[in-house]
Image: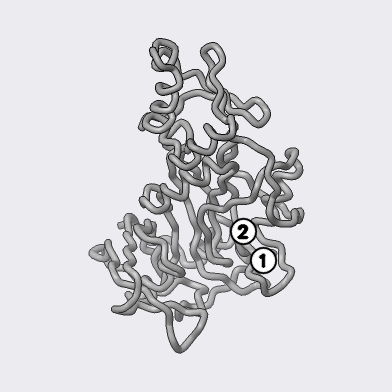
Amino acid sequence: MTGGGSWARRGEWLEAMPGRVITAATDPAAAIDQWLLETVGMPAKLHSRLRREGGVQWKGDRLRLGLFPYREAGIEPAWTALEVLFEDDFCLVVHKPAGMAVHPDGSGNEITLDHGVAAHYAASGGGVAVRHIHRLDKDTTGPVLYAKNEYAQLVLDEAMRAKSVSRLYAAIVQGTVPPGLKVIDAPIGRDRHHAARRRVSPGGQDAVTRIIGREVLQGGTVLKVQLETGRTHQIRVHLSHMGHPLFGDALYGGPAWNAGRLPHSGGVGRQALHGEILAFNHPWTKEQLEVADPWPEDMLLLREQLGADQQV
């Protein structure tokens, strides 16, 4: 699929110019359907609904699609400092700080990233539902991807299932990780002795973690890690299983570290895990996007405390 190319938003409508593939067709309606389904990759159910509801219009040489209808946020807006890393009418990528959950778990009144995104949408005029595409653990930092309309959600959800959304993490772990450790392929299941924990288990779900870079420190190792699967606590479980738990990860046996006077920490380090790069294809244009999220201050401080030694 090559995508829909350039586009413009006109209120609730997306406006595109497919060109001669439509204007030269003997049956423009059929050509539009083929272009949407095969070139753009529009999900068939959404295409059928748009056709049924008059959401596909052809005027002159312009195709108009009703992709941006008004939608309720679905969660109460709550102001919080939000660092936007990328945004257009299809996608939003924001930095998730440590100590903040992506979405409410029903246990209290804490402000989550979803609440902050709802407030961000409201400040921009509203009418956008809050739809996160993936999650990060509460104390993991990094970029989180949101879809800003139903079309984007369907396409990005499918991309997640197809493992074409790439996430590169930086982890600071205990000990010296040998160069030969490049792939951890071990199923992960629940720990029946501890409700919050996961563990490597023969009966668990398939889980594959790749180590694609490392920096050996005097007191630990910085790892660059990519996930092939997205199991709960996967990086934390896999590295602990291999004898290299993350600094600050008390749940999986990681050594404590002092995060100084950073506002989120109270002087106690969280697990040293950060999403560095999120890469995905834009839902409409199919352009490959790479969104970088610089290291947070606490992990930079930990790396400095441990002391650089050599890169391997």
Q: Residue at x 71, y 62 (%)?
A: 111
Q: Quadrant of the N terminus?
A: top left
Which residue is drawn at the image coordinates 76% and 42% (left, top)? 123
Residue 12 in percent (x, y) is at 65, 31
Q: Secondary structure at mark 2?
A: loop
> What amino acid is found at the position of numbered circle 2 in the picture?
Pro
Name the mark nearer the viewer: 1 or 2.
2
Apparent side of residue 124 relative to residue 223 in the rendered image (left or right): right
Q: Is the C terminus in the top left, top right, bottom left or bottom right quadrant?
A: bottom left
In the rendered image, the vertical position of residue 161 relative to residue 191, given as above or below = above
Query: Residue 171, percent across and down?
Result: 44, 63
Q: Residues within 10 Å of mark 2 (few under 14, many from 20)?
A: many
Work out whether residue 136 or residue 41 is closer to the camera in this orientation and state it: 41
Examine the rendered structure and indicate whether residue 48 appears above or below residue 13.
Answer: below
Colouring scheme applied when the structure was drawn: one colour
- The residue that mark 2 highlights is 97
Check the image and report above or below for 22 versus 44.
Answer: above
| 293 vs 166, nearest the viewer | 166
Contact check, label 1 and label 2, Cβ < 8 Å: yes
Name the mark on residue 264: 1
Could you tell me if residue 219 is visible in this image? no
Q: Which mark is residue 203?
A: none
- Determine if residue 26 is in view: yes
